[in-house]
Amino acid sequence: MVPLSWFLILGAALFCIGVYGVLSRRNAIGILMGVELILNAVNINLIAFWRYRTPDQLTGLVFAVFVMAIAAAEAAVGLALIIAIYRTRNTVIVEDVDLLKM
Amino acid sequence: MSLPQILFLVVGVITLGAAVAVVTSRNVLHSAFLLALTFFGVAVLYVLLDTPYLAAAQVLVYIGAISVLIIFAIMLSRKVAAPHLVQRNSQWLLSLIVAVLLFGVLAYLTLQAAWPAAKQALGVDAIGGLGEAFVGTYALPFEVVSVVLLVALVGAIIIARER
């Protein structure tokens, strides 16, 4: 039997790797990949807590499915924005997209 | 050590290794492919947590849709995603310190707490119960999420459309 703490440690590690990716990438697509890692880490925690703590209720599972749906929506809108910015500014490096900074 | 534990350790090491490569690789396309490997490792973890339905959904949604979408976006912005470009910004060292400290705090707190050692038996039929929950207790949130997804996809088409 795998202890719950193993899943939580793995989730925490995946979350922190994602945080590093979001903070350190210059490429907007790389930042989006970091966000996806973070959402996956959250889902691992949700499912692990559901399985070990409240397997008789379905709240954790339902929440994880909703997170998945929102992640898909976020990826679609994010990548569309990146493509739109690439088309007008010819870059996906976030430091070069500073239209609002006068 | 039992078989699930060995499987967890192997899959966990592969998943975390792939995730580290995702955020450190100089080639964004390699990052995208390794991201798919990370998603697959997470799907195996879902199987270890007795939720094969979510594992299937993970493979379909994350590997089948999101990874492919990301690869598409990289291909469409190929010129600026070239491998010779520096991919990390000037604050990467600070980011690394923040991430490592955050992991230290989370791991410390996790190891301090007393978690139940073993799984309880699955009281409900998870897949059937999930289906019933989506049309019963969680019918309204389910419909709202489907509308959110629809609006997001329509919005993505409008934003990315050539004008």
Image: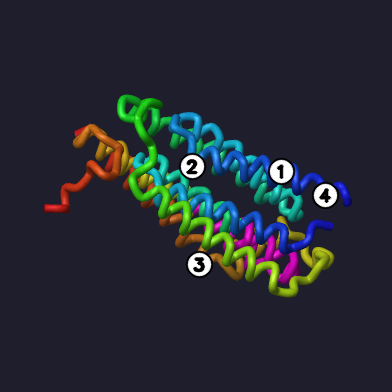
- View extreme (left): residue: A102
What crowding class fits label 2: few (fewer than 14 Cα within 10 Å), some (14-19), or many (20 or more)? many
In three-dimensional space, the C-alpha distance between marks 1 and 2, rounded to whole angstroms, equals 19 Å
Label ID, residue B80: none
Task: Evaluate if marks 4 and 2 touch, with contact meaning CB atoms under 8 Å apart.
Answer: no
In three-dimensional space, the C-alpha distance between marks 1 and 4, rounded to whole angstroms, equals 10 Å
Label ID, residue B140: 3
Tell me which numbered mark, 4 or 2, is placed earlier along the sequence.
4
Q: Is residue B16 above or below residue A58?
A: above
Tell me which numbered mark, 4 or 3, is placed earlier along the sequence.
4
Tell me which numbered mark, 1 or 4, is placed earlier along the sequence.
4
Q: Residue at x 75, y 42 (%)?
A: B10
In three-dimensional space, the C-alpha distance between marks 3 and 1, rounded to whole angstroms, equals 36 Å
Q: Residue at x 88, y 51 (%)?
A: B1
| Magenta highlight on residue A61 | yes
**Stretch of the chain drawn in magenta:** A44-69
Tell me which numbered mark, 3 or 2, is placed earlier along the sequence.
2
Residue wearing tag 1: B11
Residue A1 placed where, x, y %?
Answer: 84, 57
Residue type for callout 2: Val
In three-dimensional space, the C-alpha distance between marks 4 and 2, rounded to whole angstroms, equals 28 Å
- The answer for which chain carries disc 2 is B
Residue type for callout 3: Leu
